[in-house]
Amino acid sequence: MSTPGPVTTHRTITVDGSPVHVFECGTGPAVLMLHGSGPGTTGSGAWATTARALGTSWRLVAPDQAGFGRTPIPAGSRGGLRLWSEQAAGLMDALGVDSYAVVGHSMGGAVALALAAARPHQVTEVVAVSTMGAPGAPLSAALDAVWAAPPDLHGARDMLSRLVFDQTLVTDAAVEARAAAMRAGATAYASLFPPPRARWAAGLALSAQTLAAIRAPVLLVHGAEDLLTPLGTAVQPLIEHLADVRLHVFGRCGHVPAVEHPHEFRRLLSCFLRRQGRSAGSATNGSTI
């Protein structure tokens, strides 16, 4: 007899007067999970598999960020680091969550780091996966192409082929599903990263001062063959400026470690969150481990 998995829900939460669509899974300490910036990306699309695997120990909250999936861009606004980080903070406030870890992929990593800087007493840990946000990091040709991908089968296949090192993952079914998601979100997405796109990458960079102010422990997870956020330009500036940081690199891995190395990625994430939780408990109650 199989054990039932953690309960999952989809719902809409009002944040500062605007609707935010949220995928939630599991119970326990809260972990906010932020997706990346590729067309067709959603919170559940990026994180559902990981969340279901971890939902027996944590409460995973994966929103569609503004301009993606079923979360519109608020009237009179446009996408950007400030909007996405403020909306993420407002979402957790609306959910009544006072303390939480943040896991962010690519663009979501930059948002996670910005959120940790803005909410130091609430964000307990950060896991930044294939992250953007490094000061001075240029827009890569691969990310430029992904942001420009047209919402059709050709665009979806080209985008997925750039995301992964293992090209056997670019199946017809995966391409068709991504193309459908791209078409569904095409109208809102078209306003997010118009050319010239280097300015939008620069807008996701955090200053050295902001990074140095982050006090939460940070785990950087990266693929050695990441073409969108290359290891050399995306990670080294973060290591130089973050006060409490460690790095895990997956070999033979592109931009999506959670897809290319799912079991190892989940173990890594689980061990980091558990270890930091134990450390926090030890500091609070004076016990030793």
Image (cartoon, grey):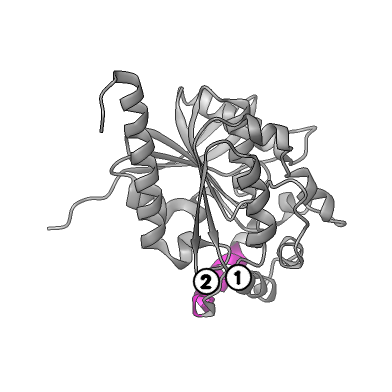
Query: Identity of the amino acid at label 1?
Result: Leu
Give the quarter of the figure containing the C terminus.
Answer: top left
Mark 2 or mark 1, earlier in chain: 1
Kindly state the secondary structure of the residue where label 1 is placed: helix
Magenta: main secondary structure: helix
Q: Which mark is residue 160?
A: 1
The answer to whether residue 185 of the structure is visible from this angle is no
Tell me the amino acid under the disc marked 2: Ala
Q: Which residue has dot 2 on it?
A: 174
Q: Residue at x 86, y 57 (%)?
A: 195
Question: In percent of the image, x 69 and y 47: which residue is there?
Answer: 134
Q: Are marks 2 and 1 in contact (CB under 8 Å)?
A: yes
> In the rendered structure, does residue 152 fall within the stretch colored magenta?
no
- Foreground of the two, 207 or 180: 207
Query: In front: 136, or 151?
Result: 136
Which residue in the rendered view is the most extreme toward the right? Answer: 196
Name the spot of residue 45 as percent of width and height, x first: 51, 55
Let me know if residue 178 is in the magenta part. Answer: yes
First to last magenta residue range: 168-180
